[in-house]
Amino acid sequence: MTNNIDDKALDLLCRAILTLETVEECRKFLEDACSHMELRTISQRMVVAKMLSEKSVYSKIIKETGASTATVSRVNKSLEYGAEGYRLVLSRLDSKVE
C-alpha cells in the first residue's frame, strides 16, 4: 500500500493521529494537515465504505454521496481485498454508542 510513501513519515502521521482524544481534536488536526478537497475525498470514501458494508447498491451510494462509480469501485475493492482498514474501523464504530 505504501509504494511511494516514506514509511517513517507515514508512521509519524499514524502516531500523531493516535494521540488525538476527541472528535474535536481530530477535526482540528485534519483541518490543519489536509486541504478541503482531501478532507472531502477521504470523508466521502468513509461514507461509501459504510454504505457498502451495509449492502447498499452502487446507484444509491452514488446518489447519496456524489461519489463517482470509480470511487465506489475502488472502495469496494479495498473492502474486499485490501488491508482490512475500513472493516476494522467500521466494526469499531458499530460497537460504540454515539
Image: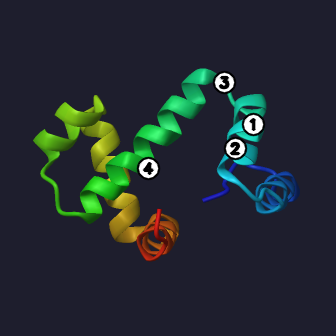
Vertical position of residue 31 compared to residue 24: above or below: above
On the image, the x and y values in percent for residue 52 come to 26, 58
Given the image, on which type of amino acid does mark 4 rest?
Met
SS at badge 1: helix
Q: Where is residue 70 in the image (x, y as percent from the top left)?
A: 30, 38
Q: Name the residue under label 1.
A: 28
Q: How far apart are marks 4 and 3 (CA)?
A: 17 Å
Residue at screen point 46% across, 69% down: 97
Residue at 48% x, 40% y: name it. Answer: 43
Amino acid type of disc 2? Glu
Relative to residue 79, is residue 86 drawn left or right? right
The answer to whether mark 1 and mark 2 are in CB contact below 8 A is yes
Q: Which of marks 3 and 1 is nearer the N terminus?
A: 1
Of the numbered discs 2 and 3, the one sitting upstream in the chain is 2
Give me the C-alpha separation between circle 4 and circle 2. Answer: 18 Å
Residue occupied by mark 2: 24
- The mark total stands at 4
Mark 2 → mark 3, Cα distance in angstroms = 17 Å
Residue lying furthest top: 36
| Residue assigned mark 3 | 35
| Dot 2 and dot 3 residues touching (CB under 8 Å) | no
Mark drawn on residue 46: 4
Q: Is mark 3 on a helix, strand or loop?
A: loop
Above/below status of 50 relative to 59: below
Q: Which percent across, then down, holds residue 82?
A: 45, 67
Residue located at (83% from left, 60% from top): 19
Q: In this view, does 35 lie to the left or right of 61?
A: right
Kindly state the secondary structure of the residue where label 4 is placed.
helix
In this rendered view, identify the residue nearer to me: 71 or 53. 53
Tell me which colouring the rendered structure shows: rainbow
Q: Which amino acid does label 3 sit on?
A: Ser
Q: How crowded is mark 4: few (under 14 residues within 10 Å), some or many (20 or more)?
A: some
